[in-house]
Image (cartoon, grey):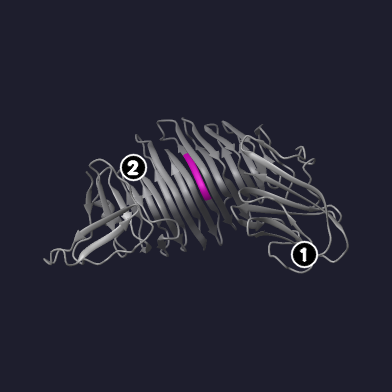
Amino acid sequence: MADIIFPTGTGAKGSIVNADLLLLADSADGNKGKDVTFAILKAAVTGDSNIIYCPIGGDIETYIAAATAGDTIVLAAGTYTITDDIDIAQSINVVGQGVGVTTIACTTASKKVFDISASAVRIADLSIDVTADISSGIIVTGVAGTVLSGVVLENLDIDLNSAAGVQLGIKSFDASLTIRNSTVNATSSDSYARAISVENAATAEAVTTVNIYNVDSVGTGSGGDNTYGILVLDSSATNDITANCYDSRFTAVKTGANEGRAIAVVGGDAIGNFYNCIANGSDADVFESTSGGLTLYDTTLVNGTTSGTITYGGTVVTSKLSTGGVFTPEVAGISPVAMHKGGVSTQVIEDTDMDDNDVMDTGITSGYGLLIVSCTTDGTSGVFRIENQTIVDVSSNALYSVTKDTDTKINVYWDTDQFKVQMLIDAGNKNVSVAFYGT
């Protein structure tokens, strides 16, 4: 049975949160049973491993240093503020109470929130919020003679927001890992940013694989080197690194020198496979350079911009969706009928005439993908990224809005149970078509 380890001395009550496990312990002051410390923890551990509860105000790294392989460090609801790296050198779990419930915050420059140098580490169910120069969210580092494996990063929200210097959301060297159900944002005010970067170096003595599922990854930079949504890199390696990415969205925005590349695979031992993903890069949606192979399956390229040798599988939409002109399914080479292929569903509503104040029910109830609204009468298109029931305008056309009842606009918004299109342009009957590409 797992041991339960509480902070000692205070007998203070912990926060009540959504939980899987209720733990009770008497305080250490001799009043047996009269003042019970309790914590509601979101954890499930079996075997002889320890469950260690780190309270708000506790030093997370101190608790981790005292743990042994297989232990679970459970963080409370609330915010932990750190001023130095949290080093993890043993195979443990670190879990919070959920994204937006447990937060690790850092405002100290040149720090790595988590610096992992062991295999079989899991970090889950928490937010990382960094506003500091030259920062990293999570770094996973193998060394000569030790290629890491079994690292899992899931249910995370990593936000490195708008500070100066290089910003790295998640970066791995010589390591196999899984990233799942997470959001990664890295923004630099004066240098480059890499939301996700995975790399094999010359010291890698084994093949490594990175699997990514349902991840939103955004890099925003303004100087220095190139900025990436995801970079798969062979850095003088002699063994392959393969990134398999599923149902994920990669964005790179860059102003100033160099480029913003949403997806990049670089170097002969770097391989990238992308399934049902969306790529949106200010300079290149997809970039390949002398790699071991880059293949896109049922993937949407928002701007239709690519560089290098790319293999296409399934339906790949590459119609310059965010530039001028009218988007139609035929332009993308897709039949204008409802279909489902390889995990990408396409819903098309065509030739709908709308007068001022008319509202169109799209029938699109939620999901991840691109919603394209075209006014064929005016020759304009608005492109919107959908994330569950949230809509984000990714087009530059001023005719379209994402707010209901905005006058002199075509408004695209969520209302009750589906996305809707509202015509508030008093200029007579207009023909409007709607297409959705995603899941």
Residue beneath the point at 38% across and 36% down? 147
Q: Is residue 339 left or right of residue 107?
A: right
Quarter holding residue 264: top right
Q: Where is residue 404 in the image (x, y as percent from the top left)?
A: 70, 65
Q: Mark 2 packing: few (<14 Cα in 10 Å), some, or many (20+)?
A: many
The answer to whether one can see residue 321 in this image is yes
Give the structural element (helix, strand or loop) at label 2.
Answer: loop
Q: Position of residue 174 (x, y in %)?
A: 42, 38
Magenta stretch: includes residue 38: no
Q: Which of these two is toward me, 357 or 195? A: 357
Amino acid type of disc 2?
Answer: Ala
Q: Residue under circle 1?
A: 409
Give the structural element (helix, strand or loop) at label 1.
Answer: loop
Q: Is residue 80 left or right of residue 374?
A: left
User: Which residues fall within the magenta stretch?
Assistant: 195-199
The answer to whether one can see residue 255 in this image is no
Q: Residue under circle 2?
A: 118
Q: Which of marks 1 and 2 is nearer the N terminus?
A: 2
Q: Which of these two is toward me, 391 or 287? A: 391
Amino acid type of disc 1?
Answer: Lys
Q: In this view, does 35 lie above or below 430?
A: below
Quarter holding residue 128: bottom left
Q: In this view, does 424 lie above or below 344?
A: below
